[in-house]
Image (spheres, grey):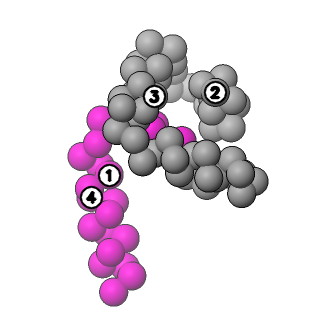
Amino acid sequence: MVFLFTLCFQQEVEKFTDLEKLYLYLQLPSGLSSAEKSDQNAMSSSRAQQMHAFSWIRNTLEEHPETSLPKQEVYDEYK
């Protein structure tokens, strides 16, 4: 049952644009404190704030296939 869920989830994620995948990745847990997690949950509950984040990503970041940034570093810059 878990395998089927994982397969379905993976197929859905493959349909996302690169920006949507990046935003999803940035939402993954990264060992934040309870207060930071609460702040992050409040942010993700607001569609307007999500659109602001998408806009920031589009206007600030560039895709470089050979470059990888730690997600916490990107999140700190966003904050």
Q: Callout 2: helix, strand or loop?
A: loop
Eye-nearest disc, 3 or 4: 3
Query: Considering only vertical position in the picture, is 22 above or below 14?
Result: above
Q: CA distance from mark 3 to mark 4?
A: 24 Å
**Image quarter in which the C terminus is found:** top right
Eye-nearest disc, 2 or 4: 2
Q: Mark 1–mark 2 contact, CB under 8 Å? A: no
Which residue corresponds to mark 4?
A: 11
Q: Amino acid at mark 4?
A: Gln
Q: Callout 1: helix, strand or loop?
A: helix
Disc assigned to residue 53? 3
What crowding class fits label 4: few (fewer than 14 Cα within 10 Å), some (14-19), or many (20 or more)? few
Q: Residue at x 39, y 82 (%)?
A: 2
Question: Residue 32: where, in percent of width, then height?
Answer: 72, 51
Of pointers 3 and 4, the one earlier in the residue sequence: 4
Q: Residue at x 69, y 47 (%)?
A: 36
Q: CA distance from mark 2 to mark 4?
A: 31 Å
> Which span is picked out in magenta?
1-27
Q: Callout 4: helix, strand or loop?
A: helix
Which residue corresponds to mark 2?
A: 79
Residue 18 visible? The answer is no
Question: Residue 58: where, in percent of width, then height?
Answer: 41, 19
Tell me which secondary structure the magenta stretch mostly adopts.
helix
Looking at this view, is 66 or 59 the one in front?
Answer: 59
